[in-house]
Amino acid sequence: MGSKNKLKRFKENESFNNVIQPSREEIENGTFELKGKWASFFENDNPIILELGCGKGEYTLGLAKLDPEKNFIGVDIKGARFWRGAKTAVQEELNNVAFIRTQIELIDQIFDENEISEIWITFPDPQIKYKRTKHRLTNQKFLEKYKSILKEDGVVNLKTDSEFMHGYTLGLLHGLGLEVVYANHDVYKNEGSPKEVLEIQTFYEKQYLGKGKPITYTKFRVS
Ligand SMILES: C[S@@+](CC[C@H](N)C(=O)[O-])C[C@H]1O[C@@H](n2cnc3c(N)ncnc32)[C@H](O)[C@@H]1O
């Protein structure tokens, strides 16, 4: 995408009331106003579900349509990508959708303890090289961050084409004694995945399916 197009999207994001772009300063000084107060943003007490690394926001939108009684927030550092989801949510008047531009590493500064009911991680970069382990979204440090914002009975959903990421996550959960609620290493071949797994496909998922790659899904707890 050209830089002119990106700038146009950044500008439009600023005009959307479903897009929140906290400054690094606000986060570092602990002055980000919505932490602990997301219910006031949505004007209801409905459960809040996050999609981490949401890209264009297909899961955020798809889940929000399936479940209007819950609120959904897509998190990504790339505003020009989630612009797509934010614009569609505005056009379709989906009031249970928001997008936040931030690094996933900072989510414990953005959401309070027990504020989140569920997390979706959709087609994350598996960060296979050893040196990249710290960026892998299911490493132990990230799992601890998720635990710090999730409700006691909260779950994490991981959907990925990466057999490496699927196996790594299952191995880590086993080692940490954390519960795997459900796991499927080829969701379109082996029956049993819920409809939100089978019916919503992201931009990256469509590319991987086009190459004939199996899609995996894991649902687990972090406490
Ligand atoms: C491979 S893409 C997948 C996008 C989308 N979920 C999909 O399936 O089409 C990974 C996304 O995660 C975002 N991302 C990766 N690491 C991140 C981080 N630490 N903080 C915020 N966003 C991150 C990237 O900007 C990118 O949009």
Image: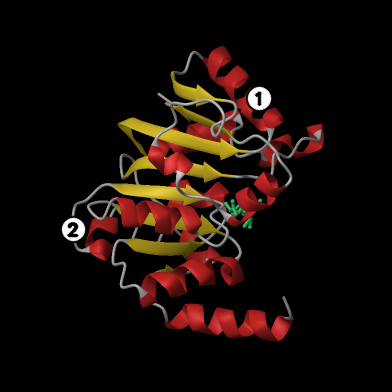
Q: Is residue 40 left or right of residue 32?
A: left
In front of the other: 128 or 193: 193
Residue 141, percent across and down? Answer: 57, 33
Q: Which colour assignment does the render follow? A: secondary structure
Q: Regarding mark 2 in the picture, which secondary structure is present there? A: loop
Q: Amino acid at mark 2?
A: Asn
Seen in the picture, residue 127 relative to 169 is either above or below; the reply is below
Left or right of 112 in this view: 10: right
The N terminus lies in which quarter of the figure?
bottom right
On the image, numbered disc 1 is attached to which residue?
A: 168
Q: CA distance from mark 2 to mark 1?
A: 37 Å
Label 2 sits on residue: 44
What amino acid type should be assigned to the residue bearing mark 1?
Answer: Tyr
Q: Dot 1, crowdedness within 10 Å: few (<14), some or many (≥20)?
A: some
Q: Is residue 32 visible in the rendered structure shown here? A: no
Q: Quadrant of residue 138?
A: top right
Element type at mark 1: helix
Front in this rendered view, residue 206 or 96: 206
Q: Where in the figure is residue 203, as x and y percent of width and height?
A: 60, 57
Residue 156: in sight, yes or no?
yes
Tell which of 98 and 151 is nearer to you.
Answer: 98
Q: Is residue 165 left or right of residue 13?
A: right
Residue 146 picture location, percent across and down: 46, 37
Q: Please identify the quarter of the rendering in which residue 8 is found.
A: bottom right
